[in-house]
Amino acid sequence: MKVITVTLNPALDREFIIEEFTVNAYHRIKGQNHMMMNPGGKGINVSMALAKLGVSSIAIGIIGGYTGRVLLTELNKVSPLISTSFVHIEEETRENIVIVDPINHTMTSINSPGPRVDKKAVELLLKRYEIYLSRAEAVVLSGSLPQGLTGEIYGKMAKKAKEKGRMVFFDMIDEYLTEALEICVPDVVKPDVRGSLTILGEGLESLEDYVEAAANLVKRGCKLVVVSYEIKNDVVATQDGVWLISTEEKVEPENILGAGDAYVAAMVYKRLTERNASMLEVARFGYAAALAKTKKLAKEMPEYEEISEALKSCRLERLR
């Protein structure tokens, strides 16, 4: 086990492919290949992507009820490279619904908030986490939090990992990121700006806003910062400067489900397998993984060969 992925608010993802989808209308799903059910939550998605790259991980977090048991059963089928250690609670794990329309190029997501988690469950999870830290090389802290938790939990977990010399990766919304950074600065951060275009409370409008936000996180101590800019561009900041990674290839919006998690997993893979790789190379490999994922309609993570092919389409432009 090389990597710990933490998913505090996992979900059972249900994905439906419905052509010409509209609201307030009756739709019939064409067949079994147009509907999928799989384990979800950003950390779990990272574990599944790492498995495609031959990297072992342990997925930990909190699950509950019947839905949680189904999620765990499905996750255990994915790959022998994924171990699991979830704390079980009574309240039901959430379910997320995604409706993909390949005709109109839309993706409609309906995400549940998740259960309320008590202090006892969190304490038990943290005890397990500390045990696994002794054997891991990297930790991925990502995704939404269930009711009753704040970004402070991510900061505490990051601090424990850094104290043991582990690499720490963040992928979370600004609310959690701001709180976590008050406790510990990660090595790599990919802020989730999908719902709110803000980083550390500052709004993102122009490209310069993204550049400034990424550069500021590096000044705070992060070694690598990746911020999504529009649908197929990323602003990348390291201690050596700021770049824009992009591609001339067309990226369909309905294919982006799981692309961000493929990105994070690929960066983890690159850091583990090529210790001499620059942070810019790490980001570029992550970008290629996300691009490779968008070639697939379903939430299916890319193989190494597909990432290598996508690398040929990546363009770099220095911004500062």
Image (cartoon, rainbow, N blue to C red):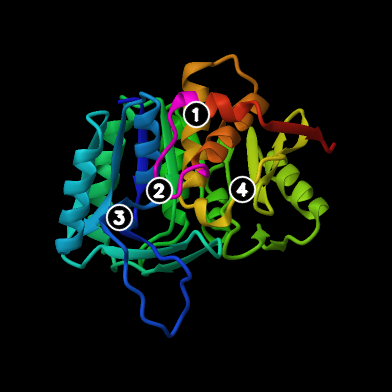
Whole-angstrom CA distance, mark 2 to mark 1, is: 15 Å
* SS at circle 2: loop
Q: Do the residues labelled 4 and 1 touch (CB within 8 Å)?
A: no
Q: Earlier in the sequence, mark 2 or mark 1?
A: 2
Mark 4 highlights which residue?
A: 251
Left or right of 208 in this view: 39: left
Farthest-out residue, front: 30
Whole-angstrom CA distance, mark 4 to mark 3, is: 22 Å
Q: Which of marks 3 and 1 is nearer the N terminus?
A: 3
How packed mark 3 is, by other alpha carbons closer than 10 Å (few <14, some 14-19, many 20 or more), is some
Q: Which of marks 4 and 3 is nearer the N terminus?
A: 3
Q: Residue 257, percent across and down?
A: 47, 52
Q: Which of marks 2 and 3 is nearer the N terminus?
A: 3
Q: Residue 244, percent across and down?
A: 75, 39
Q: What residue type is labelled 2?
A: Lys
Is residue 104 visible in the rendered image? The answer is yes
Mark 3 highlights which residue?
A: 36
Left or right of 176 in this view: 281: right
Whole-angstrom CA distance, mark 4 to mark 2, is: 15 Å
Q: Which of marks 4 and 2 is nearer the N terminus?
A: 4
Q: Which amino acid does label 4 sit on?
A: Val
Mark 2 highlights which residue?
A: 299
Q: Are marks 2 and 3 in contact (CB under 8 Å)?
A: yes
